[in-house]
Amino acid sequence: MSSLADVDKRYLENLLNMQSGSVLDYSDARFGGLFSRHKIDIHGLKYQTHGTSKAKKMRTFWEQESDALVGNVLSEMLDSYEAYCDLNSREIDKSVLEKSRNIVARLSGKTVSEKPLQTVDDFLHREFTIPNIQKLPVEALAVSIIENRLAEALKALRAGAYLSVIFLCGSVLEAVLLGAAQKDPARFNQASASPKASDDTVKRLHEWNLSQFIDVASEIGLLKPDVKKFSHGLRDFRNYIHPYQQMASGFTPDEHTAKVCFQVLKAALASVAGERGSKNREPPD
């Protein structure tokens, strides 16, 4: 049982918009996927004590699980809250978020960083140079494909084909992280965030999804924290390749969204290549 007090829950419920029975903009599938990364079947009967809505399952989860587990799940959700607000041009409630961060830090036995929140505008106004693709940890035969997709993504951005930008960026990011994992499988497989099969063995790399690659790459230091935060936003938008996923969200990506996704990809490539030099500039036109 977690040590969340009633006042803690009020802050968290406000931030996660749980009043209507939902949790942020999580669909049932994404909600289940988030918890499965922590080996929790949130849609199982165990968490339906108070009802079957996502908010009610969350409240039961808080009641039944340990501080450490609740803290780990909430930490990921707070990152999702920031990315959701940034990528959808919604204002972040910094006061409630700070209090929620303090609550999660207490549950996790950690101290809260005093570093100010990085907004999407902060991220967009940094320049990340695309590294020499030849130096990325990918197969030689994939280099030309990645180079062509990067060039096509830039053309799509200039042409206003914003969904195409997102799909191309997501595919390149997944390819590069898979390549990095194939070059150093032991390091990826030994990470605590590596996805497990039913027999508790690590899944084969080709069975990993983009979210799992992002989490593990961040854990082993291949991706910087800011890249991890915004990469999950790119991953969510990349799921719009399924029309019904986009229809369910009710959101249409625009130029701002596409620029963020292209910036995420450039930052990720620079991070993987160990070239995180940056300076202020305007986002690409």
Image (cartoon, rainbow, N blue to C red):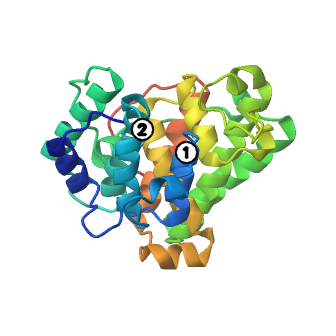
Image quadrant assignment for residue 251: bottom left
Amino acid type, label 2: Glu
Q: Residues within 10 Å of mark 2 (few under 14, many from 20)?
A: some
Q: Tell me the residue that label 1 is attached to.
A: 40
- Outermost residue, right side: 141
Q: Is residue 79 above or below residue 285?
A: above
43 relative to 148 in the view: left or right: left
Image quadrant assignment for residue 278: top left
For the residues labelled 1 and 2, the Cα–Cα distance comes to 10 Å
Q: Is residue 71 above or below residue 108?
A: below
Residue 206 seen in the current view: yes
Near-viewer residue (27 or 160) = 27
Residue at image location 72% in from the left, 47% down from the top: 146
Residue at image location 28% in from the left, 44% down from the top: 119
Near-viewer residue (6 or 20) = 6
11 relative to 141 in the view: left or right: left
Q: Position of residue 241 (x, y in %)?
A: 62, 69
Near-viewer residue (281 or 260) = 260
Amino acid type, label 1: Ile
Residue 155 seen in the current view: no
Q: How many marks?
A: 2
Q: Secondary structure at mark 2?
A: loop
Q: Position of residue 235 (x, y in %)?
A: 55, 53
135 relative to 173 in the view: left or right: right
Q: Quadrant of the N terminus?
A: top left
Residue 6 circle label? none
Image quadrant assignment for residue 177: top right
Q: Are marks 1 and 2 in contact (CB under 8 Å)?
A: yes
Q: Residues within 10 Å of mark 1 (few under 14, many from 20)?
A: some
Q: Position of residue 143 (x, y in %)?
A: 78, 41
Q: Is residue 247 above or below residue 1?
A: below
Residue 65 circle label? 2
